[in-house]
Image (tube, helix red, strand yellow):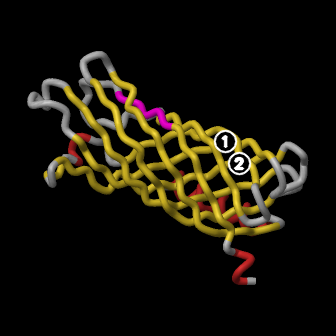
Amino acid sequence: MKKINLLFFLMFTIYTFSQQRNYGISTSIIMSKVEKSEEFNGGGSPGYRVGLFYEHELNNSFGLKSTLAIGKMQDGYYNDFFRNGTPNIFRTNLDLITLLRFYVKSNYSKGLFLTIGPRFTYINSALNDKNDVKFLYNETNFGLLFGFGFNTSEFFQIEFEADYGFTDILSTSEFKSKTLAGNITFSYDISHLLK
């Protein structure tokens, strides 16, 4: 709990002293895969994430972007636990993502930027044929996102990110399970509409 309080204090401090603040709507298309042991196989279908973002410029080159989003994913697994084929598990996540941005041309909000930062995921539900299978998953997991993006206009951004989950997503101790994903994120800044 102390670590969470410290994280919120640091984020509040950074937000307070930032130069420029933008906020808006963000949506991501996600291609995800579960990396696992040989005894357990898994794959997935494209998922999505929709949420709100808050971005703040620290100086001409650096800034932070925080996103709070709800995501929907579809996982498919098979092993001895599921003897009758491959089930599809539909899970709902709540994601908190904070990314450090570096603008290559030292002109914030213009052109190409590089991005890296942590992802915290809370798994809200997991259903297989309307049966609750949330017990198969750890309730929380952590990951690291890194990639690049660019501003296509003053109010619109596109980002391409890799997402590596470095904690086990599955609750069973039998299988080591990390997530690997590729994201395309579209963000629209609505702060100019409310000024």
Q: Quadrant of residue 195?
A: bottom right
Dot 1 lies on which element?
strand
Do tag 1 and tag 2 residues touch (Cβ < 8 Å)? yes
Is residue 179 magenta-colored? yes
Q: Specify the principal SS of the magenta part.
A: strand
Q: Quadrant of residue 109?
A: bottom right
Of residues 88 and 39, the one nearer the viewer is: 88
Q: How far apart in space, not on screen, are marks 1 and 2 (Cα)? A: 5 Å
> What type is the residue that disc 2 sits on?
Leu
Of residues 50 and 61, the one nearer the viewer is: 50
Residue receiving disc 2: 100
Of residues 141 and 22, the one nearer the viewer is: 22
Q: Where is residue 171 in the image (x, y as percent from the top left)?
A: 27, 37
Looking at the image, residue 104 lies above or below residue 80: below
Residue at x-position 52% and y-position 55%: 96
Is residue 111 magenta-colored? no
Q: Position of residue 108 (x, y in %)?
A: 84, 56
Q: In which quarter of the image is residue 168?
A: top left
Residue at x-position 71% and y-position 46%: 149
Per the rendering, the mark at residue 116 is: 1
Dot 2 lies on which element?
strand
